[in-house]
Amino acid sequence: MTADKQFNRWMRRAFILFLVVFAYIVIADVTIPMTPHSQVQRPVITVASRVAGEVTQVYVTNNQRVAAGDLLFEIDPSDYELAVEKAELALSNAKQINATLQAQLAQVQASVKEASVSLKQSRREYERMQRLLEKQLVSQQVVDQHETNVSAAEARLAAAKQNQRAVQADLGDDGELNLRLRQARNALAKAQLNLSRTQVVAPKAGVISNLQLVAGIQSQANQPLMSLVVEGQERIAADFREKSLSHIPQHAHALVVFDALPGQVFSATLRSRDMGIAQGQDQADGLLAQPDNSDRWVRDAQRIRVYVKLDDATLPVTLATGARATVMLESDSQGWAHALSRLQMTIVSYLHYVY
């Protein structure tokens, strides 16, 4: 066989191999799509104090595991202890004011009763004088004087009732409904709440990460001071080309390998997929649209983010948040196609580990 014939034979074989590989890539991209653009995600809580002040003590260290409710750090409580004492004094003062008003109310109620009795007496005297006037036993001047006494008694009764209403309004409702006491108790509860917030505790169980907080820092209210990585709520975010997801059903089976764990293939399930990306969101900022002016004939494929979760295995704790992974989605998780997928992912895991 001549050299030209051998060359042509090898060229045909290479072309056939190229067609086979190309067909496999096209078919695999829609039936078992794979992406290396994946990473581990855990919820990260930024821990902040709800009150301002100097950090006096830090009770945790970097990478320390904490349980929900564990004390993380403490703010100087001096100012807030004084605020609690001030609120307690204000509550005592409110009670004293109410006690004084109660005594005044009892006094004005007695005055109302006394004025009412006096008015009744004056009216009886006036009526008696009128009967005596009809019999001409007293003069008109005496009757007029008693009439004046009645008017004066009525005025005293009206003044006493008005004074009673004023004291009653100042006193307010009785018992727990009293406005002055409610305001004082509310101020005391707020002061006590602020004092309790000087001790900052972990909202959830997790690991303290990137800790740079030290005693002496002046903390502002709601200013993040440390990060808490929550364990037990891990997920894997994977960015696939949008055309690769066109034939993948919801809750499809998935295979996951991690760059740091060569040879280990984990079974997972597609949990959800995002309905949009940042480039597709228009802001109501009053600006005109900015069309894409790229003249590239072959543009970058648009990627859509999906989330998968391991089925029967927990995510290794050695994998930090942001750890790289490779995810493959399967339309069918049975038969030779599944075995081929696992083999491919095993090879990929070693390649990524070496690379």
Image (spheres, helix red, strand yellow):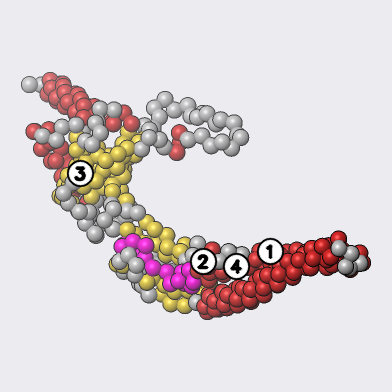
Q: Can you see residue 292?
A: yes
Q: Classify mark 2: helix, strand or loop.
A: helix
Q: Nearer the viewer, residue 106 or 326?
A: 106
**Mark 3 vs 1: CB contact within 8 A:** no
Res 71 → quadrant: bottom left
CA separation, marks 2 and 4? Answer: 10 Å
Of tags 2 and 3, the one toward the viewer is 2
Q: Residue at x 14, y 35 (%)?
A: 333
Q: Which residues are magenta?
A: 191-208
Alpha carbon distance from label 4 to label 1: 17 Å
Amino acid type at image mark 2: Glu
- The residue carrying mark 1 is 165
Residue type for callout 1: Arg
Relative height, residue 276 to residue 71 (above, below): above
Is 71 situated left or right of 156 in this image? left
Q: Position of residue 164 (x, y in %)?
A: 69, 67
Q: Please give the residue where the numbered disc 4 appears in the rendered image.
A: 180
**CB-based contact (under 8 Å), mark 4 and mark 1:** no
Of callouts 2 and 3, the N-terminal one: 2
Secondary element at image label 3: strand
Q: Which residue is mark 2?
A: 176
